[in-house]
Amino acid sequence: PGSFYCPCGARRQADVTPRMSSAPLHARDLTPGQTRVSIAIIAVLFFIFGFVSWVNAILIPYFKIGCELTHFEAYLVTFAFYISYLVFSMPAAHLLKRTGFKRGMMIGFWVMAAGAFLFIPAAMTRTYIVFLGGLFTLGAGLAILQTAANPYITVLGPQETAARRISVMGICNKGAGILAPIVFAAVVFKVTDTDLFARLAAMAPAEKAAALDELIRRVVVPYAWVGAALLALGFLVRLSPLPEIDTEHETAEVAEANADKTGILQFPHLILGALGIFLHVGASVISVDTIIPYAQSMGLPLLEAKVFPSYVLAAMIAGYVIGITLIPRLVSQLTMLRFCTTLGVVLSVLIVTTSGSVPYGGHVTDISLWFVVLLGFANSLTWAGVWPLALDGLGRFTKVGASVMIMGLCGNAILPLGYGWLADHYSVRAAYWIILPCYLYLTYYAMIGHKKRRW
């Protein structure tokens, strides 16, 4: 009972089969209390994702000074961190199939802890390549966690409200992102550093090396604490009441629709969605991680410019709040996705074509800087809109499909390097042309691409 034969002849187990209490649950089998607890635990995970990821915005100018780097070399921070998503997302999917979500998350936290501890020898020797190794390892752990958490929160309820749940996760993620550069700056930088940075060029080589050694070693204690905290979180998530969610068993309807599917490449809407994620996250991280150097190009000192990533993330949070309020009662998540991608096209053109000094928020800057800030709003509901569209109808392919989507996060690694190369060869402002094709493609996916079920 509860089984049927697919047209291809493969015998599959339908969801009507009774399950023992120890077996993984389907999302619809959870009680409202279990669902709320699960969402709360995943929200904590997204806060941690955000803190570790968005601190890169301040690490880029920090390493640029401390390790004496070019723009291109400095953006290897994002490359090393996010290229690990491309390398480890598919292995992460296979790991999760073997271990389940909870054990997989525990392993992810422990891998991240190893990356944090690598910062200690890197700082003691002021070796940039070891820092990049630590960032790569942090990204590897996050690839495992993201591969588990994103499909988990997507299937933890009805598809038509998935954008609302993902928006709540986004608030946690970007809220941590607002805090990360501020906390890092408060812990690592001193009020006298502005004067130090101004004097570096005139220092004798030995004096300069000593000053930079002292500057870079300030990360030793913070990252030792981060590593210890990540180790503890691995144990805590394993012992948490987070239930295992069954994504392997399909409903009869989904199984019949996927009967002729033998591989993940047979889902065009997923592959096009993964490309959309690649472009979305690349454009999103450019808006956050480049805004400090862009503000500095207008004459703002680093200790003033450091707050602008928080402005971008605050604009993202505003978009999430609007999404939670309006979706799906007043507007569909697809309509909001289309609005955000179109807004991204408009803002990316305005950044490079509009200028004029504007006093606002205690800063006197070019108006284009505020258009970069508003990209945060345009980016806010894109992730939340693309994920449910791309994972729709994947059934037993959900974990592997999620890993393909997470591989798209390597856009964070590649597109900022393109921005850095353009900034070195043209200007930090002209380099923003790189994000226009990103938003144009995302608009295509929101309008047409997500509907493709056959190549």
Image (tube, rainbow, N blue to C red):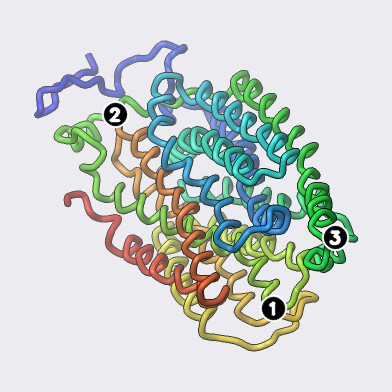
Q: Nearer the viewer, mark 2 or mark 1?
A: 1
Mark 3 → mark 2, Cα distance in angstroms: 58 Å
Instruction: Report how many numbered discs are placed on residues in the image.
Output: 3
The mark nearer the N terminus, 1 or 3, is 3
Q: Looking at the rendered structure, which numbered label has been put on residue 298?
A: 1
The residue furthest front is 205
Mark 2 → mark 1, Cα distance in angstroms: 55 Å
Instruction: Using a 10 Å C-alpha cutoff, classify the residue at mark 2 as few (fewer than 14 neighbours), some (14 to 19) or many (20 or more).
Output: many
| Residue 291 location, quadrant | bottom right
The residue shown at (28%, 30%) is 251
The residue furthest right is 192
Q: Nearer the viewer, mark 3 or mark 2?
A: 3
Horizontal side of 229 relative to 194 (left or right) equals left
The residue shown at (54%, 33%) is 141
Horizontal side of 27 relative to 352 (left or right) equals left
Residue 168 location in percent, x, y?
58, 48
Residue 371 location in percent, x, y?
58, 75
Q: Looking at the rendered structure, which numbered label has been put on residue 193?
A: 3
- The residue identified by callout 2 is 250
Q: Nearer the viewer, mark 1 or mark 3?
A: 3
Q: Amino acid at mark 2?
A: Glu
Q: Are marks 3 and 2 in contact (CB under 8 Å)?
A: no
- 241 or 423: which is nearer to us? 423
The mark nearer the N terminus, 2 or 1, is 2
Q: Amino acid at mark 1?
A: Met
